[in-house]
Image (cartoon, grey):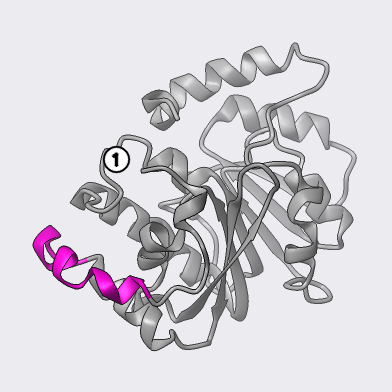
Amino acid sequence: MSGRYKERQYWDSRYRQEERLPAGGHEWFGAYCDFAPLLRRELLPGSRGLVLGCGTSSLSAALHNEGVRPLVSIDYSPVCIKEMAQRHANVPDMSWMVMDARHLQLPDGTFDLVIEKGTLDAMMVDEKDPWRPSQDAITLVDEVLSEVSRVLAPSGRFVSITFSPPHFRARHYAQPQYGWSVSCDTYGRDFHYFFYTMHKGRQLTSLDFERGQSLHKSHVDLEQTATLLEHDDEDFLNNIQV
């Protein structure tokens, strides 16, 4: 990913260019059909949804077609939100808002489903060593996840889609203050992507708790306790090059 992915100006410019493309925007980490079976098992009747960093993806439309209504989609690019609001102007129960995922201007406990696809990846694009995320990155992700936890209903689901495997990403999610459990699936063919599901109101496993605590240890501590991540039964290391 480009380091410019953190810049609002980059996305405004990119979305202006995409407006002229007949095929629309790029679908990061595949199309909805690639992970739909994983998501459908998390959808409850009458689910109220929030999409973080919606971009010009068709994800919001797909969720609406699945019955996730009302559905709020946010992005910090006003160019993107204007385009998507115009594109879906006649679709009921869909709203589009310019908003920062770190500061959700939405009430507590509003949503049964919150989903992001690649948004956190873009926020962490400057990180050079996934084993040692900077304090700035840890704080940034915590700001987003704290807001997600706040706006989720007591039994809501948070779905995060990324190319980052559990030994890097799950420890960010596995913080007790969020009040959710963490699970991970994969999808894809030539390259596997990771589909994390956080269930609000459930507890972390002991392994996930250890993962979460490892986020706050020094690099020396991580080297000494690296074996705690060797309990994974998924073959993630074959799917990513570090």
Is residue 230 among what the camera can see?
A: yes
Q: Name the quadrant of the C terminus.
A: top left
Q: Position of residue 96 (x, y in %)?
A: 68, 43
Is residue 93 among what the camera can see?
A: no
On screen, 218 above or below 94? below
Q: Position of residue 197 (x, y in %)?
A: 58, 69
Pointer 1: what residue?
Answer: 127
- Tell me, yes or no, whether the highlighted magenta stretch contains residue 72: no
On screen, 52 above or below 2? below
Q: Which range of residues does the magenta coloring cover?
A: 216-230
Question: Is the residue marked by circle 1 packed among few (<14), some (14-19), or many (20+) residues within 10 Å?
Answer: some
Q: Residue at x 12, y 62 (%)?
A: 218
- Tell me, yes or no, whether the highlighted magenta stretch contains residue 227: yes
Secondary structure under the numbered disc 1 in the rendered image: loop
Name the foreground residue: 47 vs 132.
132
Q: Position of residue 81 (x, y in %)?
A: 65, 33
Q: Position of residue 177 (x, y in %)?
A: 35, 78
Which quadrant of the structure image shows residue 42?
A: bottom right
What count of labels does the image hold?
1
Which quadrant of the structure image shows residue 232?
A: bottom left
What secondary structure predominates along the stretch shown in magenta?
helix
Q: Name the quadrant of the N terminus.
A: top left
On screen, 56 above or below 156? above
On screen, 48 above or below 55? below
Q: Residue at x 26, y 53 (%)?
A: 131
Q: Residue at x 63, y 15 (%)?
A: 16
**Three-letter code for the amino acid on which mark 1 is drawn:** Glu
Name the foreground residue: 40 vs 100.
40
**Lateral position of residue 109 relative to residue 170, left or right:** right
Name the foreground residue: 231 vs 100.
231
**Lateral position of residue 37 relative to residue 97, left or right:** right
